[in-house]
Structures are given as structure tokens and as C-alpha cells.
Image: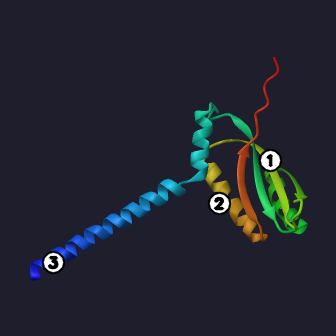
Amino acid sequence: MKWFTILLIVVLAFSLLRIVTQIRKATKSSGGDWDERFIGQLRKAGMASFDAYPVDFFFDLPSTAACDAVAAELEPEGYSVDSRQEPDSSNYSLHATRSMRLLVPDMQALTVKFRALAELHGGKYDGWAVAKKPKALP
């Protein structure tokens, strides 16, 4: 009877370990890091790693005062900023643009920074996108 209890405990421990491992694996693959995946897709589509591209950043903010505060932090860092009130909403959309290289650690750091900045002003950071790089004239 004692060996059966020990065997049952060992089987339960391995089962619990397997469940925890599978949950962690599923969380990483489904949640993952959006910045890293998106940059990977852009590189597969032919974007060069070391070229600078115009990058658009988007914020959803509750007021013009919040837009002004966020703009005041971004403009000295080289971002061009514009904002407008969303149609059929009391919220405001702030759009910031800056030319930069698409490096995973840099974009991850900006995502963390911009989420905190938006939350500080009662809003939400909606992510980034790459504007088309202007074609060189012949």
C-alpha cells in the first residue's frame, strides 16, 4: 500500500510538471512578443535591418490635455506629433512619427515606455506601424 501511495505521488508530480510546462509553452507561442514577430515579418518581406524607416506610433488618449502632455514628451525626442478627436467618441488619437532603424530591443523598449506614458495620462498605447519608405527618384 505504501509503494502505491509513493507511485501515485510521483505520477501526480510529473503530471503537474507537464501541465505547467505546456501552459508556459502555449503562453509564449500565442502571446509572444509582438514587436519581435512583426519585425521578423517585415524582414521576410524585404526590409533591410540597418536602414531607417518612418515609423508611426499610435496613442488613444482621453483629452486634449493628455495629448499635449504626451506630445510635450515626444517632440523633444525628434517625433513629429499630431492629434485629433475620434469621430463619434470623446477620445483623442495621437499619432507620432520618427525615422528610425527597426531593431527588436529598441522597439521593445519603446513599447514599454509608450505603454507607461499612455497609462500615466489615462490612455492607451495602440502600437506602431511602418510607413512606406519613399522611393528614390531616378
Q: Nearer the viewer, residue 11 or 46?
A: 11
Asked whether, in this view, residue 32 is left or right of residue 133, the answer is left
State the residue position of label 1: 97
Question: What residue is at 79 percent from the left and 31 percent from the top?
Answer: 134
Residue 30, above or below 5: above
Mark 3: amino acid: Ile
Of callouts 3 and 2, the N-terminal one:
3
Question: What residue is at 16 percent from the left and 74 percent from the top?
Answer: 7
State the residue position of label 2: 112
Percent from the top left, x then y, of residue 74?
80, 56
The tag on residue 6 is 3
Residue mark closest to the camera, 3 vs 2: 3
Percent from the top left, x then y, of residue 82?
88, 53
| Real-space Cα separation, disc 2 to disc 1, in angstroms | 17 Å
Residue 100, above or below 17: above
Instruction: Check disc 3: other Cα within 10 Å, few if <14, some if 14-19, many if 20+.
Output: few
Q: Nearer the viewer, residue 64 or 30?
A: 30
Instruction: Check disc 1: other Cα within 10 Å, few if <14, some if 14-19, many if 20+.
Output: many
Percent from the top left, x then y, of residue 41?
59, 40
Q: Residue furthest top?
A: 138
| Badge 3 vs badge 1, beta-carbon distance below 8 Å | no
Of callouts 3 and 1, the N-terminal one:
3
| Real-space Cα separation, disc 3 to disc 2, in angstroms | 47 Å
Question: What residue is at 38 percent from the left and 61 percent from the top?
Answer: 22
Q: Quadrant of the C terminus?
A: top right
Residue 96, above or below 99: below
Mark 1: amino acid: Thr
